[in-house]
Image (spheres, rainbow, N blue to C red):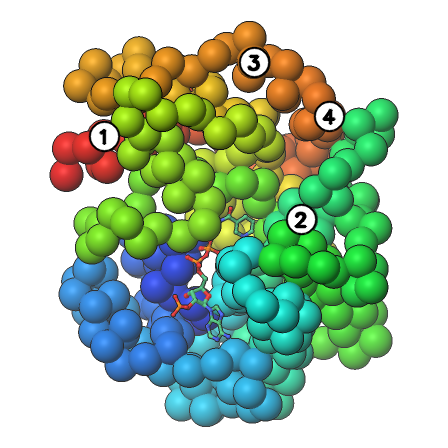
Amino acid sequence: MTAQESIFVSGANGYIAQHVVKQLLEKNYKVVGSVRSESKGEDLSKLVNSKDFSYVVVPDIAIKGAFDKALETHPDITTFIHTASPVTFRVQDPIKEIVNPAVEGTKNVLNAVKEHGKQVKHLVFTSSVAAVKSPKPDLSKILTEDAWNPITLEQVTDGLTGYSASKKFTEKALWDYVKKESPQFKVTAVNPSFVFGPQAYAIKDKSQLNLSADIVAQVFRLKPDDKIEPFAGVFIDVRDVAKAHLAAFENKEAIGQRLVLINGAFSTDLIADIVKKNFPQAQIPSGDLARSKQIVKEKVGKSDTSRTNKILGFDFISVEKSIIDTAEQFYNE
Ligand code: NAP
């Protein structure tokens, strides 16, 4: 890299975004991150602790023109990484609280880059495997980068279906825009499965982790007589997710692609088993590996994301290493 390029990261205080920021700074990029308040910006600046990091306040991505000023005042930004989106299943009105802000937020990013970011060469959009497959997929089908979640807005009834639809309709809006507008910037979507792994920086409050990190933390918090809630899905480590966000704009082969990030299946029983074997001090119940195998067979479909893996060209962190590193931080820091 020659001159120091500036990269914008929306939702910079998020779980995934903090790793993106950290890796960008490690590679000598300048980073401008958006957060929802001054105090969140100050907290993040303290954690990041770099002269190359600054923040702007964008209180709500869904408000028209949300990113205009940020881009006007930072004409040096050449890549926009859009991670901000509601990540919650706990809502009263899933369309109003999840789908609409996600879709409107992305439209605001696209308009801002078009009107106020003429120098932006690349937009990286954090989508999800939720945009690729239904939460209850047809297990006879092999999932690839070409698949789309068939969910309709009429099928949105709760937080889970709302989140699922938010990722599908937001990513659709992105590719529709690219087709219609042929913008000056290149676009890449990153579609992670359930994201686990340690927090990028020190944890302020272990009871306040984001949705996916908390799936793992819930197992860490179990008492010896508690029952493990059976749950399974597909997984990727947060450090690989961040790495893929950088590859999305650094690697020409990623242009116009959906990078679907899956490194096999996990279950809550498997997580408990890994913790028990590696952290004898953790007084949690034992994971049942037979039950784990069964639930994975019943709930988790097959996938072929070799197109993504070939573009990225690096090995993913295993579920064992991911859980061990997360537990190390959770129990010992
Ligand atoms: P996170 O920690 O909850 O981060 C979400 C970020 O978005 C936060 O900075 C949040 O700000 C911001 N945000 C949400 N709604 C907003 C709004 N209306 N206006 C402004 N900012 C808003 O979640 P994450 O897991 O890192 O998720 C980041 C991205 O990855 C999301 O697009 C998510 O859909 C995607 N993803 C996540 C996973 C996963 O397993 N974690 C898997 C696939 C895809 P506050 O913190 O201030 O609320």
Which element carries disc 4, helix, strand or loop?
strand
Task: Residue under label 3, please give it.
Answer: 291
Instruction: Kindly identify the residue that appears in the image at 23 percent across and 37 percent down.
Output: 330
Q: Earlier in the sequence, mark 2 or mark 3?
A: 2
Q: Is 195 left, or right, of 21 in this rendering? A: right
Q: Is residue 333 above or below residue 45?
A: above
- Residue 328's label in the rendered image is 1
Contact (Cβ within 8 Å) of mark 1 with mark 4: no
Image quadrant containing the N terminus? bottom left
Crowding at dot 1, Cα within 10 Å, few <14 / some 14-19 / many 20+, comes out as some
Q: Nearer the viewer, residue 310 or 316?
A: 316
Label 2 CB-ligand 1 distance < 8 A: yes
Quadrant of residue 223 within the rendered picture = top left
Q: Secondary structure at mark 1?
A: helix
Q: Which of the marked residues, 3 or 1, is nearer the chain's N terminus?
A: 3
**Given the image, on which type of amino acid does mark 1 rest?**
Glu
**CA–CA distance in space, label 3 to label 1:** 26 Å
Say which quarter of the image contains residue 189: bottom right
Marks 2/3: CA distance? 25 Å
Distance of mark 4 from mark 3, alpha carbons? Answer: 19 Å
Q: Is residue 216 above or below residue 80?
A: above
Three-letter amino acid code of the residue under disc 2: Ala
Quickly name the residue at label 4. Answer: 302
Which residue is depicted at the point 68% across and 70% down?
A: 95
Residue at 50% across / 10% down in the picture? Answer: 289
Residue 49 drawn at (x, y percent)? 17, 62
Q: Amino acid at mark 4?
A: Lys
